[in-house]
Amino acid sequence: MKKIVVAIGGSSGSIYAKVLFDRLSKLKDQVEKVGVVMSKNAKYNWELELKNKDYEKILDENEHFQFYEKNDFMAPFASGSAKYETMIVCPCSMGLMGRIATGISNDLTTRAADVILKERRRLILVIRDTPYSLIHINNMKTITEAGGVICPASPSFYSDPKNFEELAATVVDRVLDLAGLDLESYRWGE
């Protein structure tokens, strides 16, 4: 049973966060706890892009999900002793990635990422912005050298996705594979 931190950054790409929540809801047999942090911009973009506030329903529907405020440094995953094994930032803006890369722990998301890296655990950043500047590429290099994984939100098409959620799932399923979870997903050549 895994304990996972999910941070929803403020960049566009709320569909990825929604599909991630949907997938994690179905993996209760593998996931003990999901600590969630959403920025104000994340909530704004969710409402703008998905035309709903369904992120509010997640607590009601999933007892293993727990939301934390952006500046709640008393959240368990603000310390390595809580043993959260994985952190997924989905979507992750270039600004948020930059703060993580430089060790700026000015809110719960960046503090949790700092903890995950210092404890040599799995940090997965689902970056959404494009194109990349040299600053972005250098920040990706820094995070990779520190043990993090950069997983661009670049969907694949060979599974013949029928809608936006299925398209987003091609990225989210890859992220969950990287997190070490066992799920049924399209597999090349199978």
Image (cartoon, grey):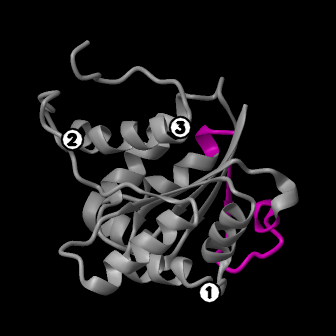
> Eyeballing the image, is 141 above or below 65?
below
Q: CA distance from mark 2 to mark 1?
A: 33 Å
Q: Which residues are magenta?
A: 60-79
Residue 131 percent across, percent down from the top left:
18, 75
> Eyeballing the image, is 1 above or below 41?
above
Q: Nearer the viewer, residue 100 or 183?
A: 100
- In the picture, measured across the screen, residue 169 lies left or right of residue 31, that is left
Q: Amino acid at mark 3?
A: Leu
The residue depicted at 62 percent of the width and 86 percent of the height is 104
Q: CA distance from mark 2 to mark 3?
A: 17 Å
Residue 104 - label: 1
Whichever of callouts 2 and 3 sits on the residue coming sooner in the sequence is 3
> Eyeballing the image, is 184 above or below 3?
above
The mark total stands at 3
Residue 167 - label: 2
The residue pinned by badge 3 equals: 24
Q: Secondary structure at mark 1?
A: loop
Q: Are marks 2 and 3 in contact (CB under 8 Å)?
A: no
- In the picture, measured across the screen, residue 7 lies left or right of residue 138, that is right
Residue 26 percent across, percent down from the top left:
53, 28
The residue depicted at 46 percent of the width and 35 percent of the height is 177
The residue depicted at 66 percent of the width and 64 percent of the height is 117
Q: CA distance from mark 3 to mark 1?
A: 28 Å
Q: Amino acid at mark 2?
A: Leu
